[in-house]
Image (cartoon, rainbow, N blue to C red):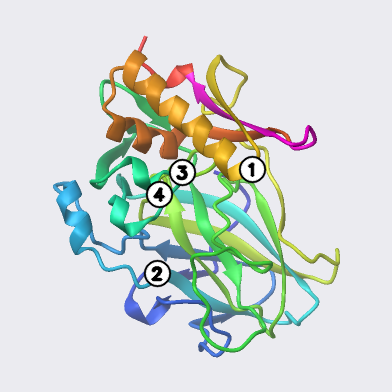
């Protein structure tokens, strides 16, 4: 935990402090804070209580998703359109529980919906810095907010699902404790909200979820008049691998005439590897890919084909 701060404000996850359904610049702020204030946000998980430790994949059909539950919005004094909101992510505290799931093929969600007719789900116990999967596999935890954003200038309600130039559902897994996110401000007060926290996630979040987990997030919110930015920017020290150090990986590659098709091929090959050589069911393999396999664009210049690879750290496996 970064040292040298005291919490100025705390927002719990009660209905009065949470908005569900979308970004909307007409929402009343739940709190007004001065620039430089440190705020602790209690964030619900993206499933918003739909699952518990006894849930199974059958419960996915009963889940109603109307949008990510976000804690906020917070009005930051002095923030005006054209400014930048600096969000220093100071600390994350999970509640010991997480879930990764994917929808049935009929929902057409995720990278490979046609590959899985039935939904899949894994309940994670989060403890001692790891999330526990099957067969002794442990995924190191490096929590981050899937969503951190400010209100867009365009009036009306806007879905929380796609990311935007003002932030939102960025799913940048390196926005861990000690990182700083910079967002362009479009409305007075910025109207900052945060949520959709993940205990861990593979770059790509291929099955549509990481390790979704309710969490406390502590952040310092500061208004800056520069730099002049048009898209989100950030500073981070990672970690850029599960252990935070260079380590052996197993890679699978997709080569195709579109980035999306190359990505699908790379992940399909990784699922095959995990099933054939690590003994996982194909459902378990898809879930693990979303939580811990990193996608990398290897090249985009050698037309007419593109190269995408999926990287699996060998350190996840016992022994």
- Residue 308 visible in the picture: yes
Q: Nearer the viewer, mark 3 or mark 4?
A: 3
**Discs 4, 2 touching: Cβ within 8 Å:** no
Q: Nearer the viewer, mark 4 or mark 1?
A: 1
Q: Earlier in the sequence, mark 4 or mark 2?
A: 2
Q: Position of residue 304 (x, y in %)?
A: 74, 36
Write the residue at 51% across / 83% down: 157
Label 2 SS: loop
Q: Position of residue 63 (x, y in %)?
A: 23, 63
Between residue 202 and residue 234, name the one nearer to us: 202
Q: Quadrant of the N terminus?
A: top right
Q: Which residues are magenta?
A: 300-313
Residue 247, compared with residue 297, is above or below; it is above
Q: Earlier in the sequence, mark 4 or mark 1?
A: 4
- Residue 103 visible in the picture: no
Q: Position of residue 261 (x, y in %)?
A: 56, 40
Q: Earlier in the sequence, mark 2 or mark 1?
A: 2
Q: Earlier in the sequence, mark 1 or mark 3?
A: 3
Write the residue at 75% across / 82% down: 80
Q: Which residue is labeled 1 in the image?
A: 258
Q: Which residue is labeled 2 in the image?
A: 69
Q: Is residue 137 left or right of residue 9?
A: left
Label 3 SS: loop
Label 4 SS: loop
Question: Residue 109 lies in magenta, yes or no?
Answer: no
Q: Work out how far the residue at label 1 is from the one at label 3, CA to CA, in angstroms.
A: 17 Å
Q: Which residue is labeled 3 in the image?
A: 206
């Amino acid at each position: 935990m970064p040292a040298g701060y005291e919490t100025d404000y705390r927002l719990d996850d009660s209905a009065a402090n949470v908005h569900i359904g979308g970004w909307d610049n007409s929402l009343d702020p739940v709190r007004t804070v001065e620039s430089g204030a440190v705020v602790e946000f209690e964030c619900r998980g993206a499933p918003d209580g739909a699952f518990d430790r006894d849930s199974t994949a059958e419960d996915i059909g009963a889940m109603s998703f109307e949008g990510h539950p976000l804690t906020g919005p917070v009005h930051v004094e002095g923030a005006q359109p054209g400014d930048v909101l600096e969000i220093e992510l100071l600390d994350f505290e999970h509640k010991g529980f997480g879930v990764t799931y994917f929808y049935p093929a009929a929902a057409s969600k995720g990278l490979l919906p046609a590959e899985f007719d039935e939904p899949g789900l894994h309940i994670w116990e989060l403890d001692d810095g790891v999330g526990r999967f099957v067969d002794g596999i442990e995924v190191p935890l490096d929590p981050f907010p899937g969503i951190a954003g400010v209100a867009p200038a365009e009036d009306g309600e806007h879905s929380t699902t796609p990311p935007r130039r003002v932030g939102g559902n960025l799913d940048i897994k390196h926005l861990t404790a000690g990182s700083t996110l910079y967002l362009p401000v479009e409305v007075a007060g910025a109207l900052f909200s945060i949520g959709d926290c993940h205990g861990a996630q593979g770059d790509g979040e291929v099955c549509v979820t990481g390790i979704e987990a309710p969490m406390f997030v502590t952040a310092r919110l500061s208004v800056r008049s520069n730099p002049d930015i048009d898209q989100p920017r950030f500073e981070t020290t990672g970690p850029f691998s599960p252990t935070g150090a260079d380590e052996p990986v197993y890679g699978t590659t997709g080569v195709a005439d579109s980035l999306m098709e190359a990505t699908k091929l790379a992940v399909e090959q990784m699922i095959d590897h995990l099933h054939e050589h690590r003994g996982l069911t194909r459902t378990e393999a898809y879930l693990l890919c979303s939580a811990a396999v990193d996608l990398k664009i290897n090249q985009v210049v050698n037309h007419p084909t593109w190269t995408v690879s999926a990287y699996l750290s060998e350190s996840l496996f016992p022994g």
